[in-house]
Image (cartoon, helix red, strand yellow):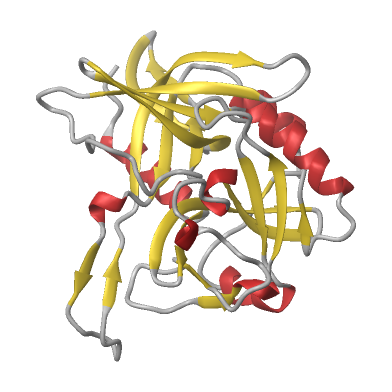
Amino acid sequence: MQIPDPVQEDAAAFVSQFSTALILDGNLVGSGTFIKCGNTFGVLTAHHVIHNPHDPSRRFDFNSSQKLGLLVADFAHCYELQLQYCGLVDIATPKRESTGPDLSLIVLPEPLIGTIKAKKQFYNLKHKRAIKLRNALPNAGYFIFSGYPDLQKDLLAPQSGFREVLFLEGWGAASGISRRWRWKNSYDFLELGITYGPKSDAIPTFQGMSGGGVWRVPLSKKTSRSTVTDIVGSEPVLAGVGFYEVGRVERIQEIRCHGPRSIYEKAVERLLRCKHLKSTRG
């Protein structure tokens, strides 16, 4: 089924309101989604983005003077905050890099929420979460894996008063679900199958997109006198978080992700239990 360009453009515009890059001391380290849960505002991402197991220089230290940059606009800007003023909730610590679970939340300091809200939106996980979970579970429609790939970054000449500008291009991989599974009464997972072919614009690697949101876009058929006249898209719903690039087999690249139960059940329940959010691990 060919998805009309206006449907894809509307979905991409909606998703971009909540998506951000994570830049640690000037280095792109991953992607994330602006969310709120109750009175907590933060960036939902993958655990391994925060606790990089391979490169200590890209590991977050919430008791240091490290600076966290967030992408909040589509023009040259600098939005940085000292990491020591942020909080951390490690929702799920990986048993293995390839299997997960792999979820964390960077808790943003309250005085800065208004500044971000002027440019971005926070996706409310708690509000109507049962409905959102139900809408995120079907495989029908199509899925967007949203983030900021390392391959799309570039250093630009001075502009807007900045001596150096890091250009980051948001990218969304449109895909279908190849499989889903769930640990008993616990986290759920899904895999997106990214297809490469003559007409595909898929990038060869998704480095930099770890922690980015997975969104389901429901589709329906508009009919007139029993004839399908158009494909219509509904509002996207957050349906997962990407955390592992499985590898390419022939023309298919599999991206392993957390599923919606991990978000609307496990993550929300974990966040609602946290009374002190400066640093909570487990």
| 158, above or below 102, in the image | below
Residue 225 visible, this orientation: yes
The quarter in which the C terminus is drawn is top right
Q: How many marks?
A: 0
Q: Nearer the viewer, residue 112 or 278?
A: 278
Return the x and y of residue 266 as percentages of the image width and height.
Answer: 76, 33
Q: Specify whether 36 is left or right of 241.
A: right
Q: State the residue at coordinates (40%, 17%).
A: 223
Return the x and y of residue 102 as percentages of the image width and height.
Answer: 60, 37
Q: Nearer the viewer, residue 200 or 250?
A: 250
Q: Specify whether 34 is left or right of 162.
A: right
Q: State the residue at coordinates (39%, 60%).
A: 28
Residue 22 visible, this orientation: no
Q: Quadrant of residue 34?
A: bottom right
Q: State the residue at coordinates (80%, 60%).
A: 277
Q: Quadrant of residue 106?
A: bottom right
Return the x and y of residue 243 as percentages of the image width and height.
Answer: 49, 36
| 151, above or below 266, in the image | below
Q: State the residue at coordinates (76%, 38%).
A: 128
| 252, above or below 30, in the image | above
Q: Nearer the viewer, residue 44 or 227?
A: 44
Q: Specify whether 116 is left or right of 8.
A: right
Farthest residue toward the top?
Answer: 226
Farthest residue toward the left?
Answer: 198
Return the x and y of residue 263 as percentages of the image width and height.
Answer: 68, 36
The quarter in which the N terminus is drawn is top left
Q: Quadrant of residue 71?
A: bottom left
